[in-house]
Amino acid sequence: MAPPPLPSPAPSRPQALLELTNLPDADVVALAQAGRESAYRELIRRYERPVFSLIFRMVRDREIAEDLSQETFIKVLNHIDRYRPEFKLSSWLFKIANNVAIDHLRKRHLRTVSIDGSPHAATAAEIEATSFDVEARGESALEEMESKELGSAIERAITRLRPEYRACIMLRHVEGRSYEEIATTLDLPLGTVKTYIHRARHELRRALEHLKE
Amino acid sequence: MERHLLPNEIELILDGEEGFGITQLKAHLRDCAPCRASLDEARAVVEALDHLPHFSPSPQFAPKLMARVQVFEPWHVAALDSARRWLPQSRPLRVVAGVMAASMALAVSLGAVFLATRFDQVLFFGTLAASRGREALVAGLGDTVAALFGDAALDALRTAGPMGMTIGLTAFLVVVAGAALGLRALATASRRRRA
């Protein structure tokens, strides 16, 4: 069963914001560049769920996903003056979101590698001092994977994909981006994007095969 | 075609590719039930992916984010926003406010034109008022100095002229500042002793 989407907050929006909802991204960005706070809020409202969803499915931890989503928006909104209208704002946002998530996963992977102690540790005491509790981390990761929100079979299968496959699949199927857009967003050749998506779908198909029985 | 479709070939068909070789793959599909079943499975996965939901961050996400974002508001935008806040929300009240503002602007303009046509009189009365004000100020200051330091000090100031007054005022400020610093040092020392 697919997990139910969390209800979005429905705050009462002021008049100015209601008018902004009908504008295309480029116009809202222009207003943000002119210093309109309401335009910043509108951009956040439009993209908080897509950005959070992408990062959440990449890192599989709600708290970390929120922090990384905040980092993404801060990077974009604090440099909104550098935005070039020939590119889609959403592509820029997803590009930064993906980079932020991949960076996090890389750092986490490095930390995971050092579970047995620092590679620079020379003595037994140093190894012991730089190693940490494997059991506790393993349980926590399992809990994350089996959490309610990522609990459906397909969500669990997605969590087992390689991060680069996951990003492509999310952009293609959740955000409805074309292969060309994904290639631009993720700075990958078009052929690579197609290969990643095809392989990812094949892996998902194999992972879900047991459900047929 | 003698063999079953490869996973990649199934994906090509799913993507709606029309390139070279696809016709042959489609022809094979028509005659091969296992390949059709594989395609259906692949299609089901794609459909499931297409229906994946978005997740929502916590309700505090946007307020927390806005507190960390530096919004640079140019002065003209800030001024316009402030002006808008003063405008009434309802249309009739806006009309009334507009009429009142226009009347005030007209009155101010007429006043300005009236004063401009009588510039010599305005200049005369302005100079008169300024000199009266200066005299009143000097008299008030003189009375204050006489009351605080006596008539002798006032006479000394008068004879010393502007330079003497400046030196006297500077000396007075230095004494006041010294007294304030001394009191502060005493207070700090007393606090330290108590601690």
Image (spheres, helix red, strand yellow):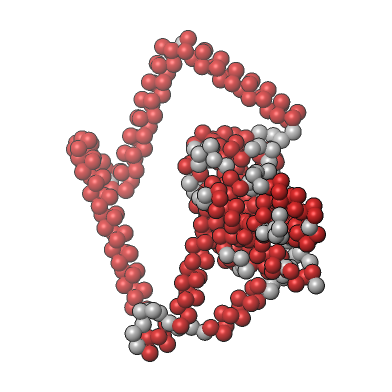
Q: Residue at x 63, y 61 (%)?
A: A200
Above or below, comparing residue B78 to residue A101 in the picture: above
Residue toward you, B10 or A86: B10
Q: Residue furthest front?
A: B2
In the figure, is residue B178 to the left or right of B16? left
Residue found 39% across the figure and 21% down from its top: B128
Q: Is residue A56 visible?
A: no
Quadrant assignment, res B65: bottom right
Residue drawn at (65%, 44%) of the image: B19
Q: As rendered, which of B37 and B116 lies closer to the eye?
A: B37
Q: Is residue A104 visible?
A: yes
Q: Is residue A75 left or right of residue B107?
A: left
Place of residue B158 in the rendered image (x, y in percent of width and height, measured from the top left)? 23, 36
Q: Is residue A62 above or below residue A44?
A: below
Observer-nearest of A102 and B82: A102
- Quarter of the rendering containing residue B39: bottom right
Residue A186 in percent (x, y) is at 53, 52
Report whether B34 appears left or right of B143.
right
Residue at the bottom extreme of this rendering: A124
Residue placed most toward the observer, A157 or B129: A157
Left or right: where A76 falls relative to A169: left
Placement of the N terminus of chain B among the 4 image quadrants: bottom right
Quarter placement of the C terminus of chain B: bottom left
Q: Which residue is found at the position 64% from the left and 77% from the top?
A: A142
How many labels, in total? Answer: 0
Percent of width and height locating residue A57:
63, 63
Image location (x, y in percent) of residue B106: 60, 17
